[in-house]
Amino acid sequence: MKISDKLQHPNWKDRITWSYEFFPPKTSTGIQNLYSRIDRMKKWGHPMFIDVTWGAGGSTSDLTPVIVNVAQKEFQLDTCMHLTCTNMSEEMIETALKKAYETGCRNILALRGDPPKNETEWTQVEGGFRYASDLVRYIKKNYGDEICIGVAGYPEGYSPDDDLERSLKHLKEKVDAGASFIVTQMFYDADNFVEWVKKVRKMGITVPIFPGIMPIQAWDSFIRRAKWSGVKIPQHFMDTLLPVKDNDDDVRERGTDLMIQFCRTLIENGITRLHFYTMNLEKAVKMIIERLGLLDEEVKDVTEKSENQLTTNRT
Ligand code: FAD
């Protein structure tokens, strides 16, 4: 089912929702573990959707659609497949879209993509797309309203643009090209995000925004990810975590309290679509969702099977 439709459905519309991002593991054991994890996570806290990343440089172009297929068909989860332009000709893009469509997947996060590993410059392949907005236009032209398209947004940190105005202008371009939702880069400064959302809205962008939430699992990964994405670490995060940095359990416990406060700030400001970067781990995500009190009310998912079947006859 399309995320845009689900957002309007009475079962999901007025509640605080959550969704999980996963990435394709490198080994077959890793893949099996991921399936078990998705199954467990679905059981304790049914997400509105899950999304599966597209490896840098197209490195998971075989595996990502397989995971999407299992998520859609075995777990009956509405899935959003990431798709990037890096190293992808139009023909390869079409093959990936077709595969996803045939599994019942109706959501694509359209991205330009990072340069392949060990390359610093992004280059367009012959017969491929230059910008995410080109990919959005292509999907829209070929699939119309049958696929719901999301795009990336950058509230802070290493956006492909170092200029906020330019970044917002290009975000607007992607939405005008046909995107129906935005998923953001991770961040820890909730107040800055709230201000960014106001600027996005001022640009006339009205589509739903899913804030990218990175749970804190351990000190080293917390610091590494903040550096890697270039996001600011608020001082109170450092003050709380630094004294216990050598004890993973304490970091996770205190990190969870910080992220709960962070989520509450978002919710108080009307941002109710929590999107978790799980990093294929469940403990910290569960602690946040549980302690926010979101598991108290049973989530009744829409019966997607029949709704998907109605629309899988595209030729
Ligand atoms: P675009 O929006 O196309 O922007 C890329 C650059 O082009 C920017 O500098 C922009 O300003 C510029 N630009 C855009 N339009 C124009 C124009 N008309 N004229 C001139 N300049 C223009 N990467 C992966 O490889 N796989 C993933 O699965 C993945 N998932 C992601 C999920 C999220 C939520 C986010 C935030 C990022 C993800 N990325 C992923 C990383 C992303 O691919 C990179 O950040 C990439 O560098 C930019 O992608 P984009 O879609 O934002 O690009």
Image (tube, rainbow, N blue to C red):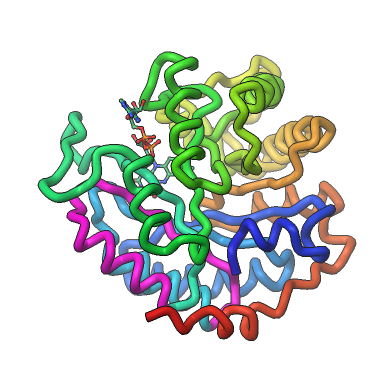
* Chain part drawn in magenta: 74-102
Question: Residue 81, how many percent across, how many down?
Answer: 44, 60
Q: Residue at x 40, y 29 (%)?
A: 228
Does residue 278 appear anywhere in the picture? yes
Q: Residue at x 42, y 55 (%)?
A: 140
Quadrant of the displayed image that contains ligand 1: top left
Count numbered badges in the picture: 0
Horizontal side of 214 relative to 67 (left or right) equals: right
Q: Which of the pair 156/83 is nearer the observer? A: 83
Question: Residue 37, how many percent across, how many down?
Answer: 56, 69
The C terminus, quarter of image: bottom left
Horizontal side of 27 relative to 103 (left or right) equals: left
Q: Which of the pair 101/60 is nearer the observer? A: 101
- Residue 92 forms part of the magenta stretch: yes
Compared to 196, does 134 lie above or below?
A: below
Horizontal side of 87 relative to 61 (left or right) equals: left
Does residue 242 appear anywhere in the picture? no
Horizontal side of 254 relative to 175 (left or right) equals: right
Q: Quadrant of residue 142?
A: bottom left
Q: Residue at x 52, y 61 (%)?
A: 145
Compared to 6, does 138 lie above or below?
A: above
- Residue 210 forms part of the magenta stretch: no
Question: Residue 226, how many percent across, how many down?
Answer: 49, 28
Q: Which of the pair 263/110 is nearer the observer? A: 110
